[in-house]
Image (tube, helix red, strand yellow):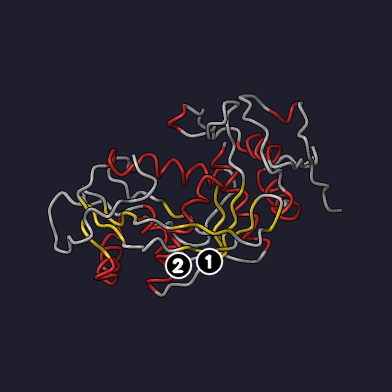
């Protein structure tokens, strides 16, 4: 349900601007990569009326491009052998490996950030922020096992292909890292919008790691109504089809008026009662 909420929000935002909606599978992590999972994501989106305007792209087949971009950064990178438990014990990277400039097996590649302070603007929840600043630490571009990092792959793809990125607010803290990479690589900066994540009562984000129930693809209209309920929007009851609900959502879902915090996840049809704390008045 959490992914559907984000995807629906993204789709409506793009279509309201007459733009093209793209699906990218972020499968750069070889330990978690699954063709079955990727196919299920695409099938689920299509079943719920969220059809991409171009072919689906996969990060896992673009590693040559990412490694070329690392080479472009040249002397701004260094090799690092520090174990994660050591770097995690400190608020910032301690700089033990700054002098390691030559390739060494079993080392990650980090960007020397010089603790750059990044300023960015992001439309977030119910308000448009004036901006926020973030101190960017020396961060990993390529992991010790050779995998490209999420921040590098996302920064390159977003900077090359996207004009708007709508994603969960759990990724807000990655924005500074990605903006710094875009700047260093001479890439365009998309407009970012971070929407509130759907969470359990405990505050944990809905995810497969937290045992969140999978969406049932045999009831897409009901799933879309539930997703809109969490976003504070209730389509008229006489709109019964997936296509009808999607069209209504494009006309009525205003991302600048979302609840700041979504109602905690309920494992039942929330549209059959328990009204949301805030609703969006449908257009006539």
Task: Measuring from the top left, give residue 36's x and y in whole percent.
Answer: 36, 39
Q: Is residue 182 above or below residue 79?
A: below
Instruction: Give the side of residue 188 with respect to residue 59, left or right.
Output: right
Which residue lies under the disc numbered 2?
A: 159
Helix, strand or loop at label 2? It is helix
Task: Measuring from the top left, give residue 283's x and y in whole percent.
Answer: 83, 53
Upstream in the sequence, badge 2 or badge 1? 2
Which residue lies under the disc numbered 1?
A: 190
Figure disc tally: 2
Q: Which corner quadrant of the image does residue 131 belong to?
A: bottom right
Where does the N terminus fall, quadrant-wise? top right
Q: CA distance from mark 2 to mark 1?
A: 7 Å
141 or 19, nearer to the observer: 141
Q: Name the residue located 21 percent from the left edge and 55 percent from the top edge.
A: 97
Q: Name the residue located 48 percent from the left edge and 72 percent from the top edge.
A: 188
Instruction: Give the side of residue 120 with respect to residue 82, left or right.
Output: right
Going by the picture, which residue comes out furthest to the bottom? 186
Q: Are marks 2 and 1 in contact (CB under 8 Å)?
A: yes
Task: Measuring from the top left, give residue 9's x and y in whole percent.
Answer: 63, 50
Q: Name the residue located 77 percent from the left edge and 42 percent from the top edge.
A: 235
Q: Residues within 10 Å of mark 1 (few under 14, many from 20)?
A: some
Residue 284's tag is none
Task: Measuring from the top left, give residue 170's x and y in whole percent.
Answer: 52, 44
Q: Residues within 10 Å of mark 2 (few under 14, many from 20)?
A: many
Q: Which corner quadrant of the image does residue 239 belong to?
A: top right
């Amino acid at each position: 349900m959490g992914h559907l909420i984000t995807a629906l929000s993204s789709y409506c935002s793009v279509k309201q601007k007459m733009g093209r909606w793209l699906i990218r599978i972020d499968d750069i992590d070889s330990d978690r990569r699954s063709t079955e999972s990727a196919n299920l994501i695409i099938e689920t989106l299509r079943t719920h009326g969220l059809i991409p305007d171009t072919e689906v792209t996969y990060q896992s087949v673009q590693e040559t491009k990412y490694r070329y971009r690392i080479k472009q950064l040249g002397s701004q990178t260094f090799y690092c052998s520090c174990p994660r438990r050591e770097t995690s014990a400190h608020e910032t990277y301690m700089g033990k490996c700054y002098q390691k400039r030559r390739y060494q097996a079993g080392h990650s590649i980090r960007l020397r950030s010089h603790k750059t302070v990044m300023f960015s603007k992001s439309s977030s929840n119910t308000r448009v922020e004036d901006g926020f600043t973030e101190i960017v630490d020396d961060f990993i571009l390529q992991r010790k096992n050779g995998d490209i990092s999420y921040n590098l792959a996302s920064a390159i793809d977003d900077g090359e292909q996207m004009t708007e990125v709508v994603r969960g607010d759990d990724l807000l803290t990655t924005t500074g890292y990605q903006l710094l990479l875009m700047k260093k690589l001479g890439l365009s900066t998309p407009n970012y919008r971070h929407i509130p994540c759907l969470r359990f009562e405990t505050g944990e984000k809905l995810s497969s790691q937290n045992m969140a129930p999978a969406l049932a693809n045999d009831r897409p209209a009901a799933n879309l109504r539930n997703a809109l309920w969490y976003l504070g929007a209730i389509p008229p009851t006489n709109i019964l089809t997936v296509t009808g609900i999607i069209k209504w959502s494009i006309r009525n879902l205003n991302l600048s008026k979302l609840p700041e915090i979504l109602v905690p996840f309920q494992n039942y049809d929330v549209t059959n009662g328990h009204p949301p704390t805030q609703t969006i008045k449908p257009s006539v």
